[in-house]
Amino acid sequence: MFQRLLSSLCLLCAASGSVAVVASEPAEPSSAPTVTADTAAVEKPAGQGIYVIPIQGQIAQPTLFIVRTGVKQAIESGAQYVVLDMDTPGGALDATLEIMQILNERFKGRTATYINDEAISAGALISAATERIYFAPSGVIGAAAPVNSTGEQIEETMRQKIQSYLLAKVRSITEEHRYRSEVISAMVDVDYELKIDDEVLKEKGKLLSLTAKEATREFGDPPAPLLAAGIVESREKLFELLAGSSDYYVREFEVTWSVRLAQWITKLSPLMLSLGGLLLFIEFKTPGFGAFGAAGIVLVVIVLFGHHVAGLSGHEAMLFFVLGAALVLVELFFFPGLIVPAVAGILLMLGSLLWGMADIWPGETFELTPGVFLQPAYNLGLALVLSMVFALLLARFLPKSLFWDRLVLAANISGRAGEDRGLGSAEGAGATVASPPVVGDIAVVVSDLHPSGRIEIGGRRFEASVEVGVVRAGESVRILRRSSFGYVVEPVQR
């Protein structure tokens, strides 16, 4: 919950450091195969797998999306290592904390960061969450004090709360490294003094930033590096170092068009679901099955597609949604009034949406816990609320508009256009407008009511719906009441 309160805060670059270039003498480059990893499954080559995830530019929700999807793909492919290829000036704190949690819990002990060239602010925190940190010769890390989204200082009390929580989080995931939590504390807290082996590395009043050479200095007995495991000239050298003498292959996470599309779909899923629900509502209120119903189903399927590409769902959720939609259609066209298929179908469709948006990790035993479905339930609930609001607005204003008459009613009207919706006919100036039907009037069904369709009374046609079952064309119905979209009727018992 506290992480959510930090969502408006950013970790921005606050200082820079000098760059020290250190030459290394690695072995000759390897000819290890490189596989581009999109969201589609790729056949696993022989040898140790090294999965590379880019952390480039400003850290925000799209970065979290990339890391979550990349780690899931690394798990599914059986990779031995996840390497973060990092060059970032910092970014949003909420996304940073979630990335740290994913790295620590989902791929613990098999992660490494390659700082090429910057890991400033949020980048320093994410680096600390990986098992090993390596530097390019020109790499630099540090200056991780939290500031607000405009770069200004946070109010003192709030700053202390954020720092306390943040440093406790860092300590919980860096306790196996001798100096790492102290170094990160010096990068986050301007009042923290970093002193090791009687040497003051950072005085109070400054934020710590380290070059590659400074980060690899060793202290203590036995000697241990201050922060970084080493300096390597290139990513290829790092891959060789991680794999040792074993064969290895490299899989790259590529930010393709489908990944970018999925990012937008997952962000807009509440709005898309609400529009889809609204279109299905309009389809329900109009005769037959047409463009509104098709467009509503397409929007819902697009939401499921986006979460599938995002690595949040598999094909199973889509299959259950299709099954639910099929049961609803069976109710409408084959067993009208039975109710059971429609109810089961709607429950399957809603369940598949929750399933499709849940963050489920591969290789884990699925546990039905509230936390798994908290965000999906929020998105779905928001979508339903928006759909109801839009539907009420439509019911209030749209039926009275010329747009509604042309868009919905014209397809099923025979006769003159002015004769619908109780307007009667006017042959000329001063003609009398016929009175609309009233409760108790008997009408004839001219297009099947399942549940909506058309009735005719006094030579005029109106939109109507039946509350239960289906009424076929040619049967008689009694008007029960006026509704926003026409009349509610019941069959006349003979």
Image: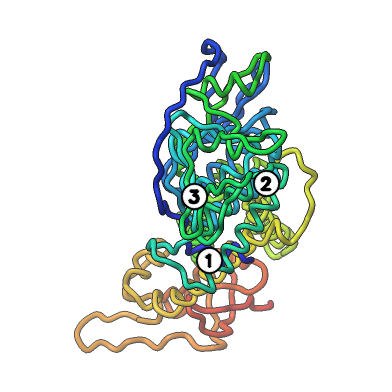
Residue at the far front: name it: 198
Pick the residue in front: 385 or 143: 143
* Percent x, y of residue 475: 59, 70
Q: State the residue lying farthest toward the left.
A: 429
User: Tag 2's secondary structure?
Assistant: helix
Placement of the C terminus among the 4 image quadrants: bottom right
Left or right: where does residue 99 sit relative to residue 245? left
Q: What residue is rendered at 50% in x and 88% in y?
A: 438
- Give the residue pinned by disc 2: 174
Q: Nearer the viewer, residue 138 or 9?
A: 138
The mark closer to the camera, 2 or 1, is 2
| Picture layout, residue 72 above or below residue 297 | above
Earlier along the polypeptide chain: callout 2 or callout 1?
A: 2
Q: Quadrant of residue 34?
A: top right
Q: Tag 1: residue type?
A: Phe
Residue at image mark 1: 281
Q: Which residue is mark 3?
A: 208
Mark 2 or 3: the one toward you = 3
Where residue 135 appears, x then y in whole percent? Answer: 51, 32
Q: Does the image show residue 116? A: yes
